[in-house]
Amino acid sequence: MPLVGCATQAPPRYAAPAWPAPAAVPLVEIPRTRVGLLLPLTGANRPLGQAMLNASQLALFDQADPAIEFLPRDTGSTPGGAAEAARSAIAEGARALAGPLTLAETAAAAGPARAARAPLMAFTSDAAQAGNGVWVLGTTPAEQAERVAHAAAAAAARR
């Protein structure tokens, strides 16, 4: 009978252990702070916008904070798109806005942000956009010149 091991056999039957049913555990709703991400996901600046979205999501994942929720909105790389993106994020409960990228987009998104009293942290480097709820996160030309002057002075440069 050397071929008995090759014959079709029914699988063994296993009985699940008789565990008591788990008690119902109420789900706890974590209050979330929604932040609108105003990024150029289409248009001329699409590659940069997509990279910034990926970086934002990676940072949020790394932070592991379930109380923060990003609401990405496409500015379309245009001022009108940025204003609409700001209104859309605010309508969905965004309490703050990060972006947009350019000076013109920031100027357009500032109106809806200020009307909703939602802080706008813009990626532009135009200091003229700052104030009244709008923060400029880019390095401004004045800041760059000041740093160069300090570095030159520290190196005892005279010209």
Image (spheres, rainbow, N blue to C red):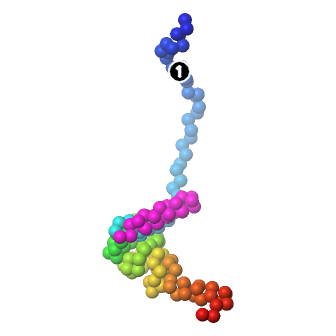
Q: How many marks?
A: 1
Seen from the viewer's position, the closer of residues 143 and 112 is: 143
| Residue with the mark numbered 1 | 13
Name the residue nearer the viewer: 132 or 18: 132
Q: In percent of the image, x 59 and y 85: which residue is there?
A: 147
Percent coordinates x, y for residue 143 in the rendering: 54, 85
Q: Residue at x 52, y 10 (%)?
A: 3
Q: On the rendered structure, is 89 left or right of 23? A: left
Residue extending farthest top: 1
In the rendered image, the quadrant that contains the N terminus is top right
Residue 115 to residue 2: above or below: below
In this view, which residue lies farthest toward the left? 80
Horizontal and vertical percent for residue 29? Answer: 51, 56
Give the prevailing secondary structure in the magenta stretch. Answer: helix
Position of 15 with respect to 114 (left or right) is right
Image coordinates for residue 33, horizontal then vertical, percent: 50, 65
Q: Nearer the viewer, residue 47 or 68?
A: 47
The residue positioned farthest toward the bottom in the image shown: 158
Task: Tell whether position 26 is magenta.
Answer: no
Position in image of residue 86 (x %, y %):
39, 72
Please indicate, yes or no, whether residue 123 appears anywhere in the rendered image. Answer: yes
Residue closer to the observer: 105 or 93: 105
Write down the region rendered in magenta: 44-68
Residue at image point 50% right, 83% down:
140
Would you place residue 9 above or below residue 20 in this image?
above
Left-right relation of 131 to 149 = left
The magenta stretch spans residue 66 = yes
Q: Quadrant of residue 111?
A: bottom left
* Location of the C terminus (image quadrant): bottom right
